[in-house]
Image (cartoon, helix red, strand yellow):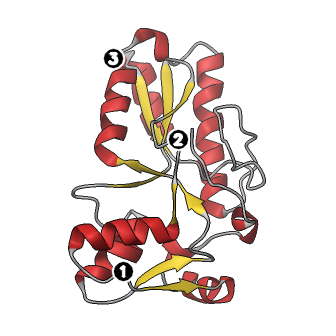
Amino acid sequence: MHNVIDACKTHKAKLVFFDNIYMYDSNSLSGMTEETPVNPPSKKGKVRAEILKMIMDEIQSGNLTALIARSADFYGPNIKNTSMLTETVFNNFSKGKKANWMISLDYKHSFTYAPDAGKATAILGNSDEAFNQVWHLPTSQSPMTGKEWINAIANEMGVEPKSQVLSMLLLKIRSLFVPIFFFRKSRFNNIQLVFC
C-alpha cells in the first residue's frame, strides 16, 4: 500500500480502494455504517485498520485524493476461494457434500453480490464528490439467515439443502489449516449481521 499510495501521489492519480469490514468493532456489527467504530478483532482487521489510517492520513494532509469502498462478504460469478459462500456452500454442494455454516443457521448474514459491488465501486470512482470518504457498497436491507442462504443455493443448484453447523471449537481447530474459518466469538452473539 505504501507503493500504491506513493505511485498515486507521484502521478497525481486518484485512488479507489476496495475494502472489507474486518476492521470494525465486533460489538458494533448490527446496523453498521461508515461511522462504525474501528477496533479490529483479528490480525486481518489490524492490517485493514492500518491501511485505512495510511490512506486517510494522506487525504487529510492533502497529498492524496482517494475513496474507500467497503463490501460485506461477497459472492457471485467467477468468485473462487475468497468467498465464504463459495468455500462453505457452493463448493461443498458441487462435490455432493453438506454445506458448512458457522455457529448457527439462525443468524442473519449479509452478503454483497460481486457484480453489484463492482458497479457501485465504478460509479463512486467516476464521481468527483465521492472522493475523500469511506462508502459502504450495496447489500440487502433484509439479510437472510444461514438456513435461508443454504436453502436458496441448494434450490438453484438442484441439490438437497443438507448442512452441518461448525461449532466455535471446530472453527478454531479448522482455522489452523484454513484461514478463512477464523472468526472471533463476539461476532456471533445472536445479532443480526447487517451491512448497510
Q: Which residue is mark 2?
A: 141
Please rate how many residues cluster around mark 1, counting C-alpha atoms within 10 Å: few if below 14, some from 14 to 19, many from 20.
many
Q: Quadrant of residue 132?
A: top right
* Identity, as a three-letter code, of the amino acid under mark 3: Asn
Q: Nearer the viewer, residue 119 or 141?
A: 141
Q: Is residue 145 left or right of residue 4?
A: right
- Residue beneath the point at 33% across and 17% down: 126
For marks 1 and 3 on the same chain, the one whose residue lies earlier in the sequence: 3
Q: Is residue 102 left or right of residue 28?
A: left
* Identity, as a three-letter code, of the amino acid under mark 1: Pro
Q: CB under 8 Å between callouts 1 and 3?
A: no
Q: Residue furthest top?
A: 129
Q: Helix, strand, or loop for circle 1?
A: loop
- Residue beneath the point at 61% across and 89% down: 170
Residue 151 position in % (x across, y down): 38, 71
Q: Quadrant of residue 52?
A: top right
- Does 153 sit above or below residue 17? below
Q: Nearer the viewer, residue 21 or 110?
A: 110
Q: Helix, strand, or loop for circle 2?
A: loop
For marks 1 and 2 on the same chain, the one whose residue lies earlier in the sequence: 2
Numbered label attached to residue 126: 3
